[in-house]
Image (cartoon, helix red, strand yellow):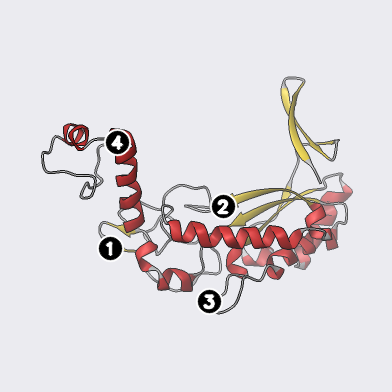
Amino acid sequence: MSSEVVFENNRPELYIDGKKYPPLVFALSDFPGARSNTAYAHRNIKNFHEQGVDIVGTDTSITLGWSKTMEFDPEPLIAELGGVIDANPDAKILLRLHVNPPYWWMKDNMEETVKYNGEYGIDNGEQQRLIAYDGLGHIRVSLASEKWMKEAGECVKAFCEALKGTPEGDALFAVQIACGKNGEWHNWGFEESIPAINAYRRRLKEKFKTVEALREYYGDDEVTFENAETGERLM
């Protein structure tokens, strides 16, 4: 399946496999009870299909297949797409794919998680809804974590490869990768994590090149690229 947005008649138009589609989407919620294999979802997907709306937004997460002891299993994610086409074989699916790491991963890699005012986030256990308590100081992966980006990227790659040649893959026309506060790539709080500090220092080196320029910026003759701290000064 191919899709593109074309600017026509002074407005963007969506084409899927060369056919223009109205910009109307029936989107399922990220609440666990709104999964695509529920009677609620099937009823509404069919109702919208009867009114000519075949673009369906659905929501899933790599946490469903990301195991501590086994290779990534894409089947639970593919099943979310399958639930849509079971209800409407003509559906064109827009997938919101959350790339948050599982709770166990964050517990095993606390140094990769956000620090709020110098402390790691509140740990009240695993949540069924990924965006529950976002922005409230709970345990969350740092968006600067290279370890998370690598491992999450491997999960996304495995998922995409597993979709090749499947009915679910044929029905998928776009994927929105989601993470951060409310799944919208906002930081969960002011970042003081180890990955964030390291990323900040790399950025300082890219920007200022020399220690002399860095010290002039900071107004501090003792600062170096190795000990520079974040603060209220914005770059």
Is 35 or 93 nearer to us in this picture? 93
Q: In this view, does 49 lie to the left or right of 149?
A: right
Residue 151 spot, x, y in % from top left = 52, 62
x and y, in percent, of residue 219 in the image: 14, 34
Marks 1 and 4, the one that precedes in the sequence = 1
Find numbered disc 1 in the image and state the secondary structure of the residue it sits on: strand
The reply, left or right, for residue 205 in relation to residue 3 is: left
- The tag earlier along the polypeptide, 4 or 2, is 2
Element carrying mark 3: loop
Contact (CB < 8 A) between labels 2 and 3? no
Label 4 to label 3: alpha-carbon separation: 38 Å
Disc 3 marks which residue?
A: 68
As displayed, is residue 165 above or below residue 128?
A: above
Indicate the quadrant where residue 98 lies: bottom right
Q: Is label 1 or label 3 in front?
A: 3
SS for tag 4?
A: loop
Q: Residues within 10 Å of mark 3 (few under 14, many from 20)?
A: few
- Type of the residue with mark 1: Glu
Quickly name the residue at label 1. 119
| Residue 194 falls in image quadrant | bottom left
Residue 2: x percent and y percent?
Answer: 79, 42
Read off the residue under disc 2. Answer: 178
Q: Which label belongs to residue 234?
A: 4
Which mark identifies residue 154?
none
